[in-house]
Image: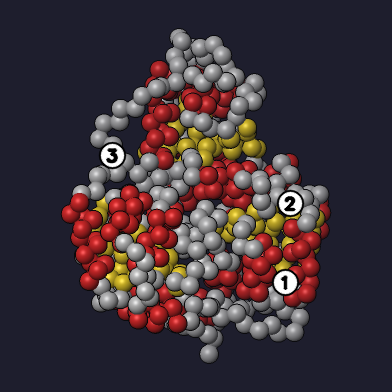
Amino acid sequence: MRENSTIRQAPSIGAQLLLECLIEEKVDTIFGYPGGAVIPIYDVLYDCPDIRHILTRHEQAAIHAADGYARVTGRPGVALVTSGPGATNAITGIANAFMDSVPLVILTGQVSTQLIGRDSFQEVNIYGMTMDVTKHNYVVRNVAELPRIIKEAFHIASTGRPGPVLIDLPKDVMTATTGGLLPAEHLNIRGYQSAPPIIEEEIAQVWDSIMQAQRPVILAGGGVISSGATEALLSLVELTGIPVVSTLMGIGAFPARHPWYLGMVGMHGTFAANRAVHRADLLLCLGTRFNDRVSGKAQSFSPESLKIHVDIDSAELNKNIPAGIGITADIRELLNRLLPLAGSRRNPSSWLIEATEWPKKVPYYSNEEGLLSPGEVISLLDRHTQGKSIVATDVGQHQIWTAHHYKFARPRRFITSGGLGTMGFGFPAAIGAAIADPSRPVLCITGDGSFQMNLQEMMTAVDYNLPIKIAILNNGYLGMVRQWQQLFYQKRYSSVQISSPDYVTFAKSYGVTGLRASTSQEAEAIIQQSLNTPGPVLMEFNVKEEQNVYPMVPPGESNDRMITSDD
């Protein structure tokens, strides 16, 4: 037990033991929402200043906030919700974290053990419901199991391929006497291996393939960031002269302003990134799932390349795209073992020169009089923050515009929902990010549709005076759905035009500064004002209604078949 913990004696009940176990795992923050089944835990939290509780306004938001906290810190985020609807409200957030490999520990209240299975008030089988969207989950049936389960949960969540772990806590277990139990000190998880060792033959095979390649490309996925491999990747690239592309989740794994970075690949990737991958004869794929938004038509993805796929999760190898060489490994370890083979820096190859001359910029669009371009707004946010802010987004057109126009130089600065594509993720994730790092402004770039899904969390941002600057790109539509309806459904705009409140008045009702811009000059002025205003600020940017995100690969097409404009 930590000497500086609040509970000095051996814990007397399960809830006290739970907090001792969390403190032992260096938990300093819990995001949550109380209810009947977790009252014993909240009662003990009342006397525990070592752990800060952040009260959200909805359980889904609590999970997203813990998710944002985890993405910024690299440590497991922790959320606490009650049984029944509290637990079911959390499922979307859990699934979101599972798809994006985010380490979370979710504590759910449960009815007392003798009431389980009897359709008791606020009882659901959250253990069974979440088996498909957790890395592992537990039901604590006896208080003696609690120390082992907590230690295992944090280890499983944060090692190997990170992911959410759920612990269901019956109320009688939380009130049971502990008999002097203490937090567990040792782990013994039979059959669990976070990462297999890399053998020398695999290193030699990768390096020989790099040396033989004429048109190599590195594809950086989110696994580069979660493994802490970004510095090793930069060193390898600068020694070998291999151009880099990234997935959406891999943004920040390599500096966006580096001349050898070609941009994001896939459905909304840059021309340079998609062309380089399509023409490559070697594709070194690091920590990516190859989902359909990355690969496009799988049969024609990078057709001329030898694909070396490195991932911590062996289940991802050959799942979506066949790999010539598949290696289950920690990416940072693999890159660090390649570096000594690279020697001194090479001169740029003709391939590198050719690839970096292809257009990386996405269409920017000139303004029509009185209307703002979304790309212009995000470029202004990038310029005024010097690309150094943490940026959380929701899902839709604004997400892709942010990926292209905000130039991320460091990892763990781009917080977005990749795999599940969860509208309503961005604002609560920004809250978690601001709790994790209050030293810098956090931008929440969102759309008028997405923001309305969790706008009640404005009160959470106010309660904790968080430096979140909300940028709503208001185009009056569910923009990405409308774009698909325009391009692929003969402009049959079905249920995509959406109304919004007066956001400036809405912000003021919460005691938040609300600002609005419709021109470039107004946009620049309110961004400056926002960054100079303490606490949360809401900025509404009225942008062109029917502006599309380009490039775009039509669904089911090869990535070299890009639509680049409305013409």
Q: Residue at x 36, y 51 (%)?
A: 332
Q: Distance between the residues labelled 3 and 1?
A: 51 Å
Question: Can you see residue 164?
Answer: yes
Read off the residue under disc 3. 193
Q: Residue at x 28, y 37 (%)?
A: 192
Q: Which amino acid does label 3 sit on?
A: Gln
Badge 3 element = loop
Q: Residue 536 carries which label?
A: 2
> Are discs 1 and 2 less than 8 Å apart at CB?
no
Whichever of callouts 3 and 1 sits on the residue coming sooner in the sequence is 3
Whichever of callouts 1 and 2 sits on the residue coming sooner in the sequence is 2
526 to the left or right of 348: right
Residue 4 location, x and y as percent? Answer: 57, 20
Residue 471 to residue 4: above or below: below
> For mark 3, does the 10 Å Cα neighbourhood hold few (<14), some (14 to 19), or many (20 or more) residues?
few
> For mark 1, does the 10 Å Cα neighbourhood hold few (<14), some (14 to 19), or many (20 or more) residues?
many
Q: Quadrant of residue 560?
A: bottom left
Q: Residue 542 carries which label?
A: 1
> Are discs 3 and 1 less than 8 Å apart at CB?
no
Residue 136 location, x and y as percent? Answer: 37, 38
Q: Residue furthest front?
A: 344
Badge 2 element = loop
Q: What residue type is labelled 1?
A: Asn
Residue 531 location, x and y as percent? Answer: 74, 58
Badge 1 element = strand
Please name the colour scheme applied to the rendered image: secondary structure
